[in-house]
Image (tube, grey):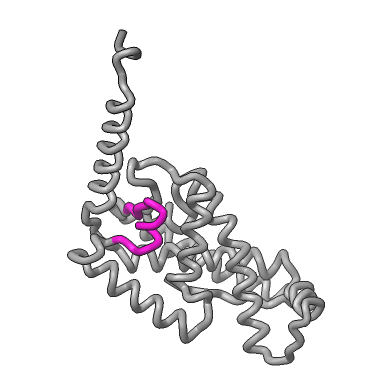
Amino acid sequence: DIKNNYTEEDIEEDYIENDLEKEKNINTPLTPHPWVRYFARALDIYLWNLFFYNIVEPKLIISLYYKLGLHTEDTAIIELLLNITSYIIWIFIEALFISSYGTTPGKWILNTKIVNVNGKFLSYNQALRRSFLVFIKGLGLLIPPITLITVGYWYYQINNIEKTFGLTSWDKECGSRVITGKIEWWRCILYIASVLILSIAVSILKIFFSSRIIVLVFL
């Protein structure tokens, strides 16, 4: 009976082999594509902010800040708070996309997926953790001076393949990998068309609606 002959030592040995295989997979050098990741995230945030700033009235969020005791008339601070609020909401939506489809609209257009070391989709909690780590470590909480430093640092790090294997710290922590396939000509055309259509939509909405649209582009 195979089942009865399968001892605790065999089970422990299998776990060790699986851990070694996982370590091997996550330490296999990846070809970094920082600019593809940049443009993919840029399109995602462009699309999300188009939705956010026209569905959610910024004045309502500002009034919520006041209720929380954040009284300020500084336009720069208000815009920063709105941008951070918008992005935090996006984090939960991004995690849903990644856990369900392994990609987001921008990443799909540029043939990029986020999977675990076994090539399968992340769980929602894993994807959520990854998105928050990107926000904190990669984007520096969207605080401009910090963001410039963190983006520049990780651009250098993922290109230092000998040291990082093309992985960011959040991908190592979450056991995730960013896989970019061949970007065919039609994907480039689709990306450009998407940007043009969104830009036209922004212009039309600015004419017919009073709410502002703030476009963020971050790595």
Q: In front here: 191 or 106?
A: 106
Q: Is 133 rendered above or below residue 176?
A: below
Residue at x 42%, y 62% (from the top left corner)? 40
Q: Residue furthest top?
A: 1
Q: Is 85 rendered above or below residue 72?
A: above
Query: Where is residue 185 drawn, in percent x and y?
Result: 31, 56
State the image quarter where residue 78 is shown.
Answer: bottom right
Q: Is residue 58 left or right of residue 38?
A: right
Q: Is residue 37 left or right of residue 205?
A: left
Is residue 178 one of those drawn in magenta? yes
Q: In front here: 125 or 1?
A: 1
State the image quarter where residue 2 is shown.
Answer: top left
Q: Is 58 rendered above or below residue 89?
A: below
Q: Residue furthest bottom?
A: 74
Q: In front here: 196 or 85?
A: 85
| Range shown magenta | 167-179
Residue at x 31%, y 21% (from the top left corner)? 7
Query: Where is residue 89 drawn, in percent x and y?
Result: 62, 63
Q: Is residue 112 left or right of residue 56?
A: left
Can I make out residue 78 in this image?
A: yes
Quadrant of the image for the N terminus?
top left
Instruction: Give the total number of marks visible in the rendering.
Output: 0
Quadrant of the image for the C terminus?
bottom left
Query: Where is residue 140 drawn, in percent x and y?
Result: 48, 76
Residue at x 44%, y 47% (from the top left corner)? 102
Query: Where is residue 144 drawn, in percent x and y?
Result: 50, 84
Is residue 87 one of those drawn in magenta? no
Can I make out residue 184 in this image?
A: no
Q: Residue furthest left?
A: 162
